[in-house]
Each structure stands twice: as C-alpha cells, then as structure tokens.
Image (cartoon, rainbow, N blue to C red):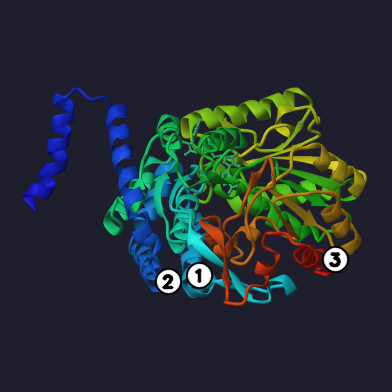
Amino acid sequence: MLYQVMLPILDIVQDILQNKGPETQIQERLDSVFQAQQENRYTISKTTASERIAKLKKILHWVDAHRTDIHKALREDFNKPEAETDLSEILVVTGEIKHAIKHLRHWMKPRRVPGSLTFLTTSSYIQFEPRGVVLIIAPWNFPFNLTMGPVVSAIAAGNCMIVKPSELTPATSALMGRLFRELFPENEIAMFEGDKDVATMLLEKPFDHIFFTGSPAVGRIVQQAAAKHLSTVTLELGGKSPVIVDKSASMDDAVAKISWGKFMNNGQACIAPDYALVHKDRYAEFVEKMSKTVKKYYGQSPEERKSSDHYARIITERHHGRLKGLVDKAIEQGAKLVLGGTADASEKYLAPTLLTDVPNHSPIMKEEIFGPVLPILAVDSMDQAIGIVQKMEKPLALYMFSNTERNIQKVLNGTTAGGTCINDTMIHFLHPNLPFGGVNFSGSGNSHGFYGFRAFSHERSVLRHHRLAPMKMMYPPYTPFVRKIINLVVRYL
Ligand code: NAD
C-alpha cells in the first residue's frame, strides 16, 4: 500500500532529477499508454455484451453516487445551474448508458444480408467489430455530456480509448479523470488533460478512429492530422443554426421554446438557435413576446436577470470579449437593441440580448454566435428565408415553427442541415433513435445510441462459402465453354 502511494512521488522526484520538462513527461506517458492500449485492444475487443454492459453499469452507479459533485464542478466552471446540469449533462449521459444497456446485445449481433443468384451457395453477414484504440477530443460547452457520451458509445463498441476533455472546464475534467481512474485501468481508458499542445501530441499517434467535437476550424486541423495515418474520423462541429418562424406559427409556443433553446447554457450550445428569420406579418409580435418570455425566465429587471440563479456565465473573459464585440459592432452598424446588451467582464456576464434590424453583412450574421444573443430578422416569404439559409454554410440544426405543411416541406426540401426540429428546438439531440451529427461544414458522421456504437465500430463484411461453388466454373483456363458460362452470367445475372 505504502509502495503504491510512494510510486508516483518517486516518479516525480526522478523526473525533477533528470530535469524533464512537462512536455517530455506527457510525451513519455502518452507513448507508454498508447503502447499499452495497443497491446490490450484485442482483449477488450473480444469482450461480450454482458462484460461491456457491466462496465456501463459501473459508470451509471458512479454518476448516480456523484451527482452533487457533478453539479458543483459545473457551477465552478461556468456557474451552470443545477437544473440545467441535470437536464443537459447528467440525464443525457445516463440516458445514453441505459439505452446502450438495453440494446447492446442486439446491436452486437451480426446482421445477415440477403444474397443474389450469384451467391446462392453462400451466406453473408455484417459483423460489427471495434475500431481498436480511439481518441476522443471534447469541447467545453457541455463538458460532461460531450465527453462521456462518446465514451459510452466507445465502450459499448469494445474499444480502448484516450480521452482529452477541454482545458476550459478544469473542475469537470478533474472529476471525469477521477471517474476513469477509479473504474478503468489506463490500458483501457486513459485521460490526458491539456490544451491544443496536448491535443497536437495526441493527434500524432496512429489512432484507429478519432471522435472530435468542437469548432469547424479545429475540425479541419483534426481531419488533416487523421489523414496522415488514414485514421477514420467523426467530426461533430458547429455553425449558425437558423430558426424560421412562418405566418402560421403558434407564437406563444414558439417563443417559449426558442427562448429556452437560445439561453440555456448561456447560449453556448452547438445547436442553439443562432438567429431567427420571422415572417414580417408576425415580426412585431415575435419580438414583443420574446422579450416578455426572457423576462419571465430570468427576471423582470436587468438587476434580477444578472443575479438570477438560473442563468449561466460565459466560459472565459476572452469569449466574453468576443461576444460583447459582436453586439457592439452590430449596434454600430445599425442594429437595434430590444433587450439586454449589458455586460460585466469581471463576472463574465452578458445579459440575454435581443437584436433587431441587424444588417446582413454584420459579423454577428457571419460567425457562429455561441452566446446569449439572438438577432431577429424579418422576411417577406419562406423563399426569402430559404435563400438566406442557402447562402450560409450548412448548419448543424435548422428549426422551423409553422402549422402549414406546404411551408414545412418547402423549407425541408430547400435547405440541408445536420438535424431539424419542427415546432421545437434542441430536443432532437435527446432522441435515442435519431442519429446526431452535422453535414460538411457542421460535421460528418453521427453519434448517439446505435449510431454512436456504429461510429466506434468497423462494419466487417463476412462471406461464408459452402462446398458447392459455381464460381469455380468460371476459373481459368478460359475455354470456349467457360466463356459461354461467363457470357450467360453477364447477360442474365
Ligand atoms: P474548439 O474547437 O476550440 O475545442 C475543442 C477541443 O479541441 C478542445 O478539447 C481543445 O483543447 C481542442 N483543440 C483546440 N485547438 C486545437 C488544435 N489546434 N488541435 C487539436 N485540438 C485542438 O471548440 P470549443 O470552443 O471547445 O467548442 C465550441 C465549438 O464546438 C463550437 O463551434 C460548437 O458549435 C462546437 N460544438 C459542436 C458540438 C456538436 O455536437 N456538433 C457540440 C458542442 C460544441
């Protein structure tokens, strides 16, 4: 016991004596962990559904026992309200685990595929096999959910993994580090904390798969690094997700759902409605009702909203400054402030903000906002709304509030997006049977439920031939008789 406690201390003393910098230490640990996981990968890949389910249950119990610690960590990282942590961090992860536990046996079963005349004497199936040793890089905005969600899928699929959470949420990262250390050996799951320098070191390794969640800019870097080893990638990225409100929308319902989707997590959600396109006939009503709803959610006066316990904070002063800059620039360019706009850098507080008359060329209409600011634009028609969306990069989510089927179909057919909610925002993320992912700029590949399991699996084709093999009749030498058979096959099969 004493020896186990002393060992890490002796390692540190030895490193100091040998004058090793932190970078060398990380590199050495990475080399040894990566090697150990390579050696362990086939042991883990052979695990049965019951063994994997047992691991998932261990996580479920740990999360249950440490719910208060998770609340505390997220309060510390960006003042996230406990109710939001329950809904958007804990529930998402426990839901993902329970769904996997229920369905894993079925997911792991080989899928038989039908043959054709040519394959009459064979039987064929798809076998899901683990990718091997995978890398999971996570962002800060839902630090528990977006780290643990992919981890659950990777365990279900039978992989070894290295996990790098965001450097901007140290309390949550430390807690997850504890979870991994208490439940898994490092040759199965290891966590490396650190910023882009650590991520760059990790990306040098020939991982079998890289699951990255973050910005499109870093997504490009990850894809380039993966290309060096031809590692496969899942990219869960971001972008500007529009919300379209047509003339027939049920307005009270729409503003309740848009206000929740926009200001939850302080607007720092990859699928938060980024900007609203509202039919001109309902524009004034939308603006007025949004303003009322935000006050109802977070407080009637600016002071009440600032001291609200239900409103999180911006993650860092740098992000706060960027958002304040976007709002100030939009106003300078002619946008009108309907609500909010007040900021306090020392508290990383930005009031829930509504802007109207925002010019199209303003930076706030060009880059992903990722904060509690909603630009509201009036449109003459659905065609105009569609035209605006088409000119932008393909979004991760597109929301539509309407009671007119023709308009709903028009928007679905005239745009593309990773996912869409009709008459709601955000909740498609929670659906266990829908794939979650982006399209091109907003990402590639999917996560959640079976789709997460699939992302961390290779679909191996297996064909079994029985004794009788008609193909043999077409082997060389290509005599006139063999040519005749080949001709028949080409013609009729
Ligand atoms: P980010 O891209 O800055 O960072 C994400 C991760 O990449 C972090 O762990 C970070 O340390 C690492 N990283 C940063 N620079 C790197 C580099 N040069 N090389 C390798 N790794 C690097 O993203 P963020 O600020 O943490 O998160 C916000 C972005 O993530 C937004 O664009 C948002 O839309 C997107 N996002 C997408 C999803 C999704 O599921 N699609 C979910 C959440 C956030």
Q: Earlier in the sequence, mark 1 or mark 2?
A: 2
Residue 358: horizontal and vertical position, in percent? Answer: 78, 32
User: Which of disc 1 and disc 3 is earlier in sequence?
Assistant: 1
Which of 446 and 383 lies nearest the eye of the viewer?
446
Q: CA distance from mark 3 to mark 2?
A: 45 Å
Is there CB contact under 8 Å for labels 1 and 2?
A: yes
Mark 1 element type: helix
Q: Amino acid at mark 1?
A: Met
Residue 108 disc label? 1
x 32%, y 28%: residue: 23
Measured Cα–Cα span from mark 1 to mark 2: 7 Å
Q: Amino acid at mark 3?
A: Arg
Residue at numbered disc 2: 49
> For the residue carrying disc 3, how many other residues have a C-alpha within 10 Å: few (<14), some (14-19), or many (20+)?
few
Query: Could you tell me residue 164's position as x and y percent?
Result: 42, 42
**Tag shown at residue 300:** none
Q: Nearer the viewer, mark 3 or mark 2?
A: 3
Visible in this render: residue 271? Answer: yes
- Which residue appears at 71% of the width and 47% of the height? 291
Dot 1: few (<14), some (14–19), or many (≥20) neighbours within 10 Å?
many
Classify residue 252 by image quadrant: bottom right
Q: Nearer the viewer, residue 52 or 466?
A: 466
Q: Residue 120 falls in which quadrant of the image? A: bottom right
Residue lying furthest left = 2
Q: Amino acid at mark 2?
A: Ala
**Taking 54 as reference, is 299 left or right?**
right
In this view, 57 is above or below 240: below
